[in-house]
Image: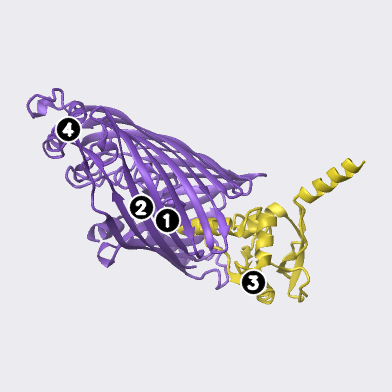
């Protein structure tokens, strides 16, 4: 909690500036009391997941391990949204499992000059693809897990930013929406970079079709927000990098055809990075790397663990795409939505051990590539309740062999408020 | 000839005509006299937030289970209520907007629109309208 509060302090002055503007601004204060109402809403969610027969390389031999089922205690997200006038609004999104783990995921103020020009300041989920702004709201989408680019242990990019200019342009048959974002960079370790993100999307056929592109540049060499041994990063820079300049580009499409919804996204992150030799030695000595990963990190994998033996140059691409399909069917007992997902993700630089900043999916593979097929069903007995069950199979290469393992998940969520 | 009549009847049956089971109403002070179907959809989805005169648009909806709501959703938005529900959840959870207030009866809709200068709603076509609100023509 203290970390979250400390991070919040950095942008609270900006939100405060907006509050001051709201208090002073006379223009546009023409909303009725009803329109100025504070809206409070959110959801509770809980999840169970279990993995069977996960392959693991031990002493050169692949062995299978089944981990105990994990139960996520009720997780909540509480959102507050208030329109102070036609031009000013505030949004706060608090989430966590209990009061000790409260996190202010979002807290921003927005000034709307007109439809084409809005400024949002604070801690903001950047507009990036189909999911980032909705990723907290698992009851809303038909799957349980987010797409791989925003999976918690291998984010392609930091989810939040601090300044976003956005707007919409209405066309005859649709709406163009743009956004440009910037912030103080990936890490907390200080950098003088000027990162820029953008998103451009066209929504048409009465919102049934969305097509767009998003991108990001780190604006030069940057560092991660986690040191080695501090867990997986909250952004796209791995902990053992001394510096990393990276650019991301991708596209997305969503189409709704009657009851059928299809989604597709493709992303590429090009990293021009330099490894920190000391950090790499710590990882090599403690993180339990695969032979192929040792060969990437060390000039001579069988040589001494010295700074001179570390391969510092690390230019690599992270790539991912997914296809999701869901068919919504209303019955007398509620809405039933069977769904299918195929995810592909490749990060040749990562490792498996999450404590050292890795990713236990891509990092488990020789080449950092894996595919995941998921089938599931979402059942909504009432509009506010969602019960989801799905099964995934992971496919990848380990020690030169094609391997796979299953995973099952159950998720229950309840939306409250209006 | 019979085949032509049958074909014509089929085309008529399949064309997305605008049913007359509801009328769209605005506050009597609103200068709007007619509105296109596309614009109506934008107003109720809060994609267009201000009237031409500059005041805020304040849509009000029928209850989610109301048959009139289903008819309006299919004819104006060309989508079922369940899809629109997800639209509003996405708007709310991303902080973009919140769904319009819902009222349980035509009388409550009329009272709301009469009170809110920028109000817009829809009621059953056979509902008697007071002088405080007025009907707006909808163009397909």
Could you tell me which chain the residue with mark 4 belongs to? A
Residue A138 visible in image = no
Chain B on-screen colour: yellow
> Above or below — where is A369 with respect to A324?
above
Indicate the position of residue A350 as horizontal and vertical percent values: 25, 36
> Which quadrant of the structure image shows residue B125?
bottom right
Please identify, in this view, whether the residue under mark 1 or under mark 3 is nearer the observer: 1
Per the image, label 3 sits on a secondary structure element best described as loop
- Distance from disc 4 to disc 1, alpha carbons, whole Å, reads 36 Å
Indicate the position of residue B72 as horizontal and vertical percent values: 68, 61
Q: Residue at x 15, y 31 (%)?
A: A60
Please identify, in this view, whether the residue under mark 2 or under mark 3 is nearer the observer: 2
Say yes or no: labels 4 and 2 on the same chain.
Answer: yes
Could you tell me which chain the residue with mark 1 belongs to? A
Q: Which chain wears purple?
A: A
Q: Which residue is mark 1?
A: A388
Describe residue A69's horizontal placement relative to residue A412 as left or right.
Answer: left
- Distance from disc 4 to disc 2, alpha carbons, whole Å, reads 29 Å
- Distance from disc 2 to disc 3, alpha carbons, whole Å, reads 47 Å
Please tell me which residue lies in front, A262 or B94: A262
């Amino acid at each position: 909690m203290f970390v979250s509060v400390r991070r919040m302090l950095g942008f609270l002055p900006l939100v405060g500036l907006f509050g001051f503007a709201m208090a002073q601004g006379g223009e546009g204060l023409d909303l009725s009391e009803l329109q100025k109402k504070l809206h409070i809403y959110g959801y509770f969610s809980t999840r169970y997941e279990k993995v069977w027969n996960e392959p693991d390389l031990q002493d050169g031999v692949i062995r299978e391990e089944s981990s105990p089922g994990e139960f996520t205690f009720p997780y909540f997200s509480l959102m507050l949204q208030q329109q102070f006038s036609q031009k000013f609004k505030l949004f706060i999104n608090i989430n966590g499992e209990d009061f000790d783990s409260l996190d202010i995921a979002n807290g921003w103020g927005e000034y709307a000059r007109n439809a084409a020009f809005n400024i949002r300041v604070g801690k903001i989920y950047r507009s990036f693809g189909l999911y980032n702004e909705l990723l907290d709201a698992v009851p809303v989408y038909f799957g349980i897990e987010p797409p791989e680019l925003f999976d918690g242990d291998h984010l392609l990019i930091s989810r939040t930013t601090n300044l976003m200019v956005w707007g919409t342009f209405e066309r005859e048959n649709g709406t163009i929406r743009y956004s440009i974002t910037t912030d103080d960079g990936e890490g907390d370790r200080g950098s003088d970079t000027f990162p820029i993100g953008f998103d451009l999307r066209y929504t048409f056929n009465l919102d049934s079709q969305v097509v767009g592109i998003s991108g990001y540049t780190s604006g030069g060499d940057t560092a991660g927000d986690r040191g080695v041994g501090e867990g997986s990063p909250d952004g796209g820079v791995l902990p053992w990098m001394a510096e990393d300049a990276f650019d991301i580009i991708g596209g997305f499409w969503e189409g709704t055809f009657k009851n059928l919804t299809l989604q597709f996204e493709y992303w590429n992150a090009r990293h021009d990075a330099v490894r920190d030799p000391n950090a790499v030695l710590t990882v090599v000595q403690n993180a339990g790397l695969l032979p192929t990963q040792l060969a990437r990190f060390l000039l001579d994998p069988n040589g001494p663990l010295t700074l001179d033996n570390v391969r510092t140059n690390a230019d690599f691409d992270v790539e991912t795409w997914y296809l999701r399909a869901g068919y919504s069917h209303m019955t007398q007992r509620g809405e039933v939505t069977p769904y299918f997902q195929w995810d592909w993700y490749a990060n040749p630089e990562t490792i498996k051990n999450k404590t050292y900043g890795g990713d236990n999916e891509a990092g488990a593979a020789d080449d950092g590539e894996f595919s995941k097929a998921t089938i599931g069903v979402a059942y909504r007995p009432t509009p506010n309740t969602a019960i989801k069950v799905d099964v995934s199979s992971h496919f990848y290469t380990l020690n030169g062999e094609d391997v796979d393992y299953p995973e099952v998940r159950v998720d229950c969520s309840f939306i409250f408020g209006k | 000839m019979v085949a032509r009549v049958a074909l014509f009847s089929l085309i008529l049956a399949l064309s997305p005509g605008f049913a007359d089971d509801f009328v769209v109403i605005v506050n009597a002070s609103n200068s709007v006299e007619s509105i296109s179907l596309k614009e109506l959809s934008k107003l109720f989805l809060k994609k267009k937030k201000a009237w031409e005169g500059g005041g805020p648009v304040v849509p009000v909806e029928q209850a989610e289970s109301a048959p009139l709501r289903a008819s309006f959703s299919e004819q104006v938005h060309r989508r079922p209520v369940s899809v629109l529900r997800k639209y509003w959840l996405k708007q709310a959870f991303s902080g973009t907007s919140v769904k319009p207030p819902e009222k349980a009866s035509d009388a409550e809709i009329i009272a709301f629109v009469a009170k809110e200068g920028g109000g817009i709603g829809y009621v059953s076509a056979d509902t008697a309208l007071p002088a405080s609100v007025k009907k707006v023509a909808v163009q397909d």
